[in-house]
Amino acid sequence: MLGIFFKTIAETMGLVFQELRNNKLRTSLSLLGVSIGIFCIIAVLSAVDSLKRNMESGLNKLGTDMIYITRWPWQFSNEEYTWWEYVKRPTMKYDEFQQLSDKLTLAKAVAIETWLSPQEVKFMDHTLQNASISGVTSQYDEVYTMNFMSGRYFTDGESVGGSEVAILGYEVAQELFPGGLQPVGKYFWVRANGSQFKLRVIGVLEKEGESIIDISNDNSIIIPFNYIRRIVDMNSPMIDPMIEVRPKEGVTADEIKDEIYPIMRNIRNLRPAEQNDFAVNEITLAADALDNLFAALNMVGMIIGGFSILVGGFGIANIMFVSVKERTNVIGIKKSLGAKNYLILTEFLIEAIVLSLIGCLFGLLLVWVLMLVAENLSDFGFILSWTNIAIGAIISISLGVVAGIVPAITASRMNPVEAIRSR
């Protein structure tokens, strides 16, 4: 029985390729719908997977358990965002950061960070216009992982004293110090927030790569927070610091949030009836919002591809009906020689599945080629996972069964005498 089944498959494969050779245009046009449908579905799934991997990579740099304290709550829903209420809240202060750092027992590290808007960064005749400048405190390297290509992090004395030192991201170092020039120990000028100042490079970070959510430090200049306090008016509306907390190993985000709220309320002398005038945000809020976005994008891809798949299914069904009509005489001869109905049904069903899989193969090949081209044109990494390939194959097999079942049943139920007499 098993031998007969495999023999049927082998004969069916031969008939499929014969059909392709004899009716190239008709078969190609019919399979085009399957190819386009699979391409749309798998291209969207792969693009979403690639985006998700890139974003998750960026979020992982921060740590999924990270806590951010600021006056602005993060919101990823469609509810009204009452920014006019939040803008009235006081910004995070350095002394608040110090008190919180001293009182938190569940935190591994606490840092405060603020940002400047640089108009120009210059070393000799090399200038940058779009670098990001952030001021951080001494535990920033424990809050975030920092890998140095050369040099070092701030000492406690440099951080507390607000020394005129800086750590450069990879891209900033490449732009300001081209040609293999060693940045460490060199001085450069920065013009930002109405001030102009000179900084000495003490470290250069390794390349982190691009991230869609712009978490990379490649384009950053990191300086001591207390240096910014010396040169900039901290009450300026352009300055909006954020306190960053990394919990100890094994401590959940909810546990450390429960410790943060009463401490911050006490620091700000809030009465029991008063609402919080600060927000405690966690990175998982962004991750959850991204999951919802990716689910919606996947659904859009399925719907778009579904229409093409539907057209392809009708095409395959048409091929199968024509194939049954053309081979009616052969079907009659097979049945007269003892071929069972299920063997005839299996033969035509396998033929429909193989045709659908051929369309799937071309669709997947097109996705693969497109991703190779996209990777060569950008630094973004695209992936065509085995899971998505399996999804394409399952969709194609299902399509082949649905499109081929009626023609296959029709063929299997033919009367052998009438089939032999047909012309």
Image (cartoon, grey):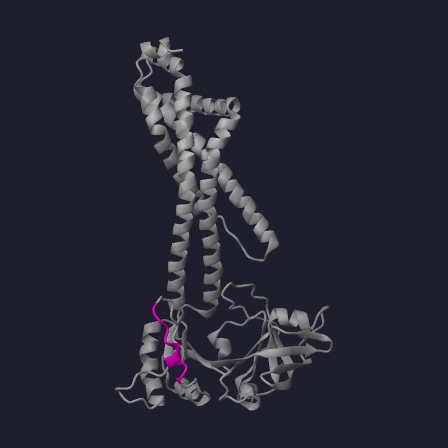
Tell me where residue 225 appears, x and y as whole percent: 53, 84
Residue at 41% over, 88% down: 96
Point out the stretch of residues depicted in magenta.
Answer: 79-89
Give the overall secondary structure of the magenta segment.
Answer: loop
Above or below, 373 relative to 266:
above
Tell me where residue 397 appears, x and y as whole percent: 39, 35
Say which of 216 and 27 sits in front: 27
Tell me where residue 372 appears, x and y as whole percent: 57, 48
Residue at 58% over, 83% down: 193
Residue 343 seen in the current view: no
Q: How many numbered badges does the structure rendering display? A: 0
Which image quarter: residue 320?
top left
Which image quarter: residue 98?
bottom left
Residue 378 placement, left or right of 353: right
Tell me where residue 88 appears, x and y as whole percent: 40, 84
Q: Is residue 170 magenta?
A: no
User: Considering the image in quadrants, where does the C terminus appear?
Assistant: top left
Above or below, 237 relative to 396:
below
User: Considering the image in quadrants, where does the N terminus appear?
Assistant: top left
Residue at 40% over, 69% down: 283
Residue 116 seen in the current view: yes
Above or below, 112 relative to 79:
below
The residue most toward the left is 273
Residue 18 placement, left or right of 278: right
